Image (spheres, rainbow, N blue to C red):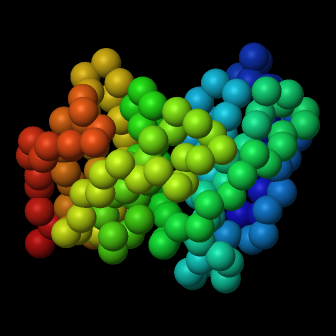
Amino acid sequence: ANGMHIFDNSNPLQPQYLSVFRHATACDPVYVDGDVAYVTLRDGQPCETFTNQLDVVDVSVLTDPKLIRSFPMHNPHGLSKYEDALFICENTQGVKVFDASNHETVGQKMIAQIDGFQAYDIITLKDKGLGLVIGANGFFQFDITDPAEPVLISNIIAQ
């Protein structure tokens, strides 16, 4: 909860510790895409207190991760990418979609928002153009082939 730890898992039976990107104590889901890691930090129990934000981290040198930029968020949870779109679950604000074509401006370029429900985590299925979202209200499946216009395909509402 106080950093993103990097391991070499070329031998899955004996992963080797490489480095850590330290941050304040917070809940911190991570999504890695090539040489860039996206880390969402949020407050709340058991996460202690912290500013809600997205950290964009250069991991091109695995033994020396470096912060590219931080962006303020509402209450970010799980995240995933589809092509050049970064999807971030923002709890009561649903899912926000950002243009991730430029790491320096990703948190400033929201291109869509899917709201009306609480969103905790998202998995994107790149080969199918789908976003699978789970939250307090249930499970949602979206067509994300056009990230600026996500389309609800189906949902299972929690009782």
- Of 54 and 5, nearer the camera is 54
Q: Is residue 60 above or below residue 143?
A: above
Query: Does residue 19 show up?
Result: yes
How far from the left and from the top, in percent, is residue 148? Answer: 28, 42
At x 62%, y 61%, the residue is 71
At x 84%, y 43%, the residue is 66
At x 42%, y 27%, the residue is 83
- Of 44 and 147, nearer the camera is 147
Based on the displayed image, in which of its 4 quarters is residue 138 positioned? bottom left
Query: Does residue 135 show up?
Result: no
Q: Is residue 148 above or below residue 2?
A: above
Based on the displayed image, in which of its 4 quarters is residue 2 positioned? bottom right
How far from the left and from the top, in percent, is residue 125? Answer: 33, 29
Which of the image's four quarters has the N terminus?
A: bottom right
Which of the image's four quarters has the C terminus?
A: bottom left
> Is residue 91 found left or right of 75 in the rendered image?
left
How far from the left and from the top, in percent, is residue 53? Answer: 61, 65
How far from the left and from the top, in percent, is residue 124? Answer: 36, 35
> Is residue 65 found left or right of 102 in the rendered image?
right
> Is residue 35 found left or right of 84 in the rendered image?
right
- Of 138 and 54, nearer the camera is 54
At x 33%, y 70%, the residue is 93
* Numbered marks: total: 0
Q: Is residue 157 above or below residue 39?
A: below
- Of 55 and 6, nearer the camera is 55
> Is residue 143 found left or right of 113 in the rendered image?
left
